[in-house]
């Protein structure tokens, strides 16, 4: 077999990931014909068809699946080699491939900014999605570290708690429950409660609260976006259950307030993790160590203003 180029291997990996030549081209910042040419050249080198048309999309053949798997491993090893060489000179470099659940996206800037400012040779590839998407990315090794509330049961991971964070019931300042004395969870059950999709961290937390309180899981609406929940709740369309981090600007502007419910908000864990039994790049290991050491202080600093306003 003749030598293949990294560009050809990358084209195959991205086409396999997106099942689309156009989306692979977008990810590589090249034209579609350029990606198609790379695939044809790789097929000529291997002597077998690697892809086939599937309606409007494209899928890998059996040979393509084998080749894409090796191509991804080759590219990952090459990147790790660069990191190791840089480490010999005391430089933390490479691409930090990190994934985080949507609720954590407001948490990421105070973690990533100081880490990358201290390490100017580090590049960042950040993926934000729902829990299922992030777990799948970790399983496919598209990311090296993930941040979420609870480690997935379906994967073996090495996980570490690095911070506590509050989440709770929120509503607009004009909502009738804001004026109710001795507010209870039963009152919230009777409201139009807007929650995230099944499997999300906030959904799991509110389900646990309902079960512990002896209430049926009777939610008003299921919404797959924190932003959509905030907009609907601030407009007076119900009550939401969200991370305090996700509502920082709305609390500051007065659009949202925490419901005056005993025990609200509740604390939950943030955890950082990587696949067990898999080598972790030095830059990812450095970030994981940094988060474990500094994460709680950074999170507490971000939430300081919220607790000051709550006390006032």
Image (spheres, helix red, strand yellow):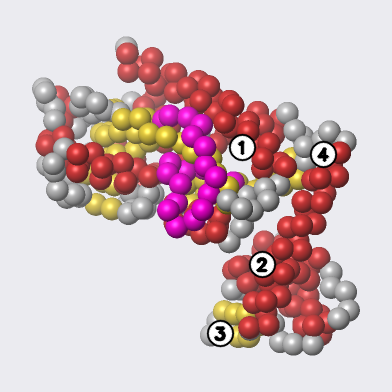
Circle 1 residue: 288
Q: Tag count in the figure?
A: 4
Tag 3 secondary structure = strand
Horizontal arrangement in the rendering, residue 163 relative to residue 69 (left or right): left
Q: Does the magenta-highlighted stretch encompass residue 159?
A: yes
Q: From the viewer's perspective, is the residue at label 3 or at label 1 nearer?
A: 1
Q: From the viewer's perspective, is the residue at label 2 or at label 4 nearer?
A: 4
Where does the image place residue 61, in percent across and percent down from the top left? 63, 84
| Bounds of the magenta segment | 145-165
Is residue 21 among the parts visible in the rendering?
no
Residue that appears at 34% across and 33% down: 167
Q: Nearer the viewer, residue 263 or 120?
A: 263
Q: Identify the mark nearer the N-term, 3 or 1.
A: 3
Q: CA distance from mark 4 to mark 3?
A: 44 Å
Where does the image place residue 275, in percent across and percent down from the top left? 57, 51
Where does the image place residue 286, in percent across and percent down from the top left? 68, 36
Q: CA distance from mark 3 to mark 2?
A: 16 Å
Q: Residues within 10 Å of mark 4 (few under 14, many from 20)?
A: some
Circle 4 residue: 87
Residue that appears at 53% across and 85% down: 55
Tag 4 secondary structure = helix
Q: Residues within 10 Å of mark 2 (few under 14, many from 20)?
A: many
Q: Which mark is residue 14?
A: 2
Give residue 52's quadrant in the image: bottom right
Please tell me whether residue 217 is drawn above or below residue 54 in the rendered image: above
Where does the image place residue 249, in percent across and percent down from the top left? 42, 30
Q: Are marks 3 and 1 in contact (CB under 8 Å)?
A: no
Q: Which mark is residue 297?
A: none
Q: Which mark is residue 54?
A: 3
Tag 1 secondary structure = helix
Q: CA distance from mark 3 to mark 1?
A: 40 Å
């Amino acid at each position: 077999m003749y030598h293949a180029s990294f560009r050809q291997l990358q084209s195959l990996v991205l086409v396999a990931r997106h099942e689309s030549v156009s989306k692979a081209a977008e990810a590589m910042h090249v034209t579609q014909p350029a990606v198609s040419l790379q695939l044809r050249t790789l097929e000529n080198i291997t002597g077998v068809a690697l892809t086939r048309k599937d309606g409007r999309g494209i899928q890998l053949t059996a040979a393509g699946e084998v080749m894409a798997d090796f191509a991804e491993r080759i590219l990952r090893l090459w990147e790790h080699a660069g990191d190791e060489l840089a480490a010999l000179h005391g430089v933390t470099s490479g691409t930090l491939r990190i994934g985080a659940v949507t609720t954590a996206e407001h948490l990421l800037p105070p973690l990533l900014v100081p880490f990358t400012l201290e390490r100017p040779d580090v590049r960042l590839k950040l993926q934000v999605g729902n829990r299922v998407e992030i777990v799948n990315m970790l399983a496919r090794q598209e990311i090296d570290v993930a941040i979420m509330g609870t480690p997935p049961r379906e994967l073996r991971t090495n996980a570490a708690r690095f911070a506590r964070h509050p989440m709770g019931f929120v509503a607009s300042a004009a909502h009738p429950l804001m004026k109710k004395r001795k507010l209870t969870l039963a009152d919230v059950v009777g409201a139009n409660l807007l929650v995230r999709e099944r499997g999300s961290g906030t959904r799991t937390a509110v389900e646990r609260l309902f079960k512990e309180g002896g209430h049926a899981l009777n939610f008003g609406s299921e919404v797959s976006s924190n932003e959509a929940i905030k907009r609907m709740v601030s407009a007076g369309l119900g009550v939401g259950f969200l991370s305090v981090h996700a509502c920082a600007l709305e609390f500051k502007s007065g659009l949202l307030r925490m419901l005056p419910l005993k025990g609200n908000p509740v604390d939950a864990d943030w955890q950082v993790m990587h696949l067990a039994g898999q080598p972790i790049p030095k830059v990812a290991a450095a970030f994981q160590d940094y988060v474990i050491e500094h994460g709680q202080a950074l999170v507490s600093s971000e939430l300081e203003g919220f607790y000051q306003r709550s006390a006032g």
